[in-house]
Amino acid sequence: TYSTVNAVNFENMEVDTYNVHFLTYQFHTGAGDVGIFGRFGIKNTNGTYSYRDANNHYANLRGEANNTFGEYKSTAMWAHQHANLGTMNTSPDGLGFTGYLYLYNLGDSTKHSQMTQHSIYTARTTNTACFNIGSASYPTLERHEAYSIFPNTQTTSGVASLYGLRYS
């Protein structure tokens, strides 16, 4: 559970123990119209974390209940997108954004870190139900031990959980 934060950071992830990580989130409240974004993070030698804020690759499909569809994609973005053009102001059930994602290859510096996601939210202009599905990768081969998910404007409150999955 988090309250009035700019980002939800999962740090010191057990990337040597788990092959895949599963993250769920619910952004309950926030200020204004927003998008939800994510970044892979590395652990610095001083123990702090830095999040990759350039060259994020992603491609998403977005759909609305009013039969409007579109795509978002980039190979040079400051983050990768989970949802866009939604609102936390008019959500009828109090859940502005809800979603889940899978994170792959975080601890393997010989592979690209990857993410797949699915989110649902309320559109900011039409107030209709929306979905966003897609994937992302970071093009540099490096070890990632952290992941950040955040609204692109203001702060948010809600709940997020991270689980580890291990191949057997």
Image (cartoon, grey):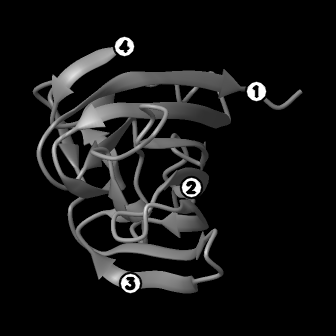
Q: Residue 115's mark?
A: 2
Q: Earlier in the sequence, mark 3 or mark 1?
A: 3
> Residue at 57% across / 60% down in the picture?
111
Question: Dot 1 corresponds to which residue?
Answer: 166
Q: First in sequence, mark 4 or 3: give its number.
A: 4
Q: Nearer the viewer, mark 4 or mark 3?
A: 4
Mark 3 and mark 1 in contact? Answer it, CB < 8 Å: no
- Quarter of the figure with residue 132: bottom right
How far apart are labels 2 and 4 at the CA level? 22 Å
The foreground one among 59 and 14 is: 59
| Residue for badge 4 | 1
Residue 126 pos. (x, y %): 42, 70
User: Is the C-beta separation of discs 4 and 3 under 8 Å?
Assistant: no
Quadrant housing the N terminus: top left
Q: Could you tell me how far apart the alpha carbons at marks 3 and 2 are, in whole angstroms?
A: 14 Å
In the picture of the structure, the residue carrying the numbered disc 3 is 75
- The amino acid beneath tag 3 is Thr
**N-term mark: 3 or 2:** 3
User: Dot 3: what SS?
Assistant: strand
Foreground mark, 3 or 1, reads 3
Q: Sort mark 3 into few (<14), some (14-19) or many (20+) by Cα contacts within 10 Å.
A: some
Left or right, residue 8 beside residue 91: left
| Residue count near mark 4 (Cα–Cα under 10 Å), binned few <14, some 14–19, many ≥20 | few
